[in-house]
Amino acid sequence: MNTFTVSITGAIVIVASMRGLTRGYDTSAEQVPEIPAVQTASFEQAATWLTSRVTTCGLEINAAHRLGVIGGSNALNLLLTSFWQRAYYHIDAYDVGPNTIKLDIIRVIGKFHTPEAKQALLAIAKSYWAAGPHKSSHNWIDHEFRRVVVMTAHELERWAGDDDVHAYAESVTGSRRFRNVFSDEGFGEICRAYLIKLREVGEMKRNGTISPAEIAQEAAMRLAQAQEQGRKGRNPPADVDIAMKVLIAGLPQGIKTNLCAQAQRDYDRIEARIYDLSVQASQQRRWTDDLKKQHDDLTPELLKYRALKDYLSMTNHCGLPYCLPLE
């Protein structure tokens, strides 16, 4: 069996185990428990499966999530210990299997919603950013660095308005390294977007925009303003633009649906008013100065609400790569 075959076989086992399909998968040491058993496991059992040398990637992930459900400082400390004890895996090409557990540990820690969890995520983020991407003899991109930095930024977003998190986001996005390590289009562009999103959401929250609905409306408004700048021949910052699109794409669909409906009502109202002005101009057989002024004042509002409903009704993920399971 050649190396390529082994790699494919290993990937299939990993994906299957994540979906709970490796029932009775044998290891050289012992029988691996079925995935459903982990969902009701005690703290001690979940801890054993998270740290055991015979567990598969899927079982470790389920054990980590079980610890998240159990909660408490002991579970948080165990998850952190497990994260830091795992070897740094420089992913060659795009194989994500061996470090998936690290990303899931970050996701689980983020769901704790405690100051201790925030500090843990911030410590991971700062440590990885300070160390920078590892160099490879083959010049491959360090995907562990990228995924961990992006995942921590995503989970830190609920604390984006806090001084320490906002300072981290500003420091990262304002550094020279930021452009250098994420210079490529596609994946690098998305990485930049998530970190800029953390910074921008922090600014929104610090300015009093708190609720998801307010944040969604603010993001859509910024996109509408950027569109208007483009219409006038100005080039708005592309990174902020994509960051706002990523932000909207990740918000609950119910919030976007309600805001989109409101934007549609505002659009229809202004459109009807502009039509009335056209009728009056037709009746008077000319556009008076007053009618022109009213029309010119309403046109930007019409374009704004059209952009708002267009952006809020987005159903795609704005190019989010499949390898970032952020939700």
Image (cartoon, helix red, strand yellow):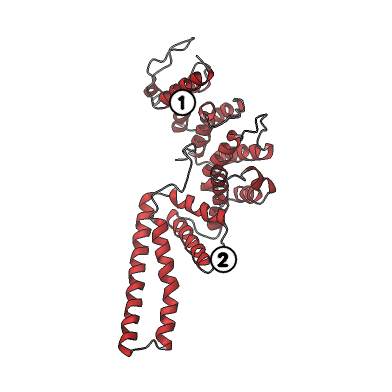
Amino acid under disc 1: Ala
* Among the 4 quarters of the image, the one containing residue 128: top right
Q: Residue at x 49, y 35 (%)?
A: 108
Residue 169 vs 139, above or below: the answer is below
> Residue 19 got which mark?
none
Give the x, y percent position of residue 121.
Answer: 58, 39
**Circle 1 sits in a helix, a strand or a loop, which is it?**
helix
| Residue at x 66% of width, y 52% of height | 174
- Vertical placement of 298 versus 57: above or below? below
Pair 1/2: label in front: 2
Where residue 201 sits in the image (x, y, percent)? 53, 53
Q: Which residue is mark 1?
A: 63
Residue 225, position as x, y percentages in the image: 50, 65
Give whichever of 210, 301 is nearer the camera: 301
Looking at the rendered image, the quarter that the C terminus falls into is: top left
Which residue position is annotated with label 2? 234
Crowd band around label 1 with a 10 angstrom C-alpha radius: few (<14), some (14–19), many (20+): many
The reply to whether residue 166 is visible in this rendering is yes
Q: CA distance from mark 1 to mark 2?
A: 51 Å
Residue 27 position, x and y percent, is 46, 12
Give the mark, 1 or 2, whose residue is nearer the N terminus: 1
Residue positioned 65% across, 46% down in the render: 178
Could you tell me the amino acid type at mark 2?
Arg
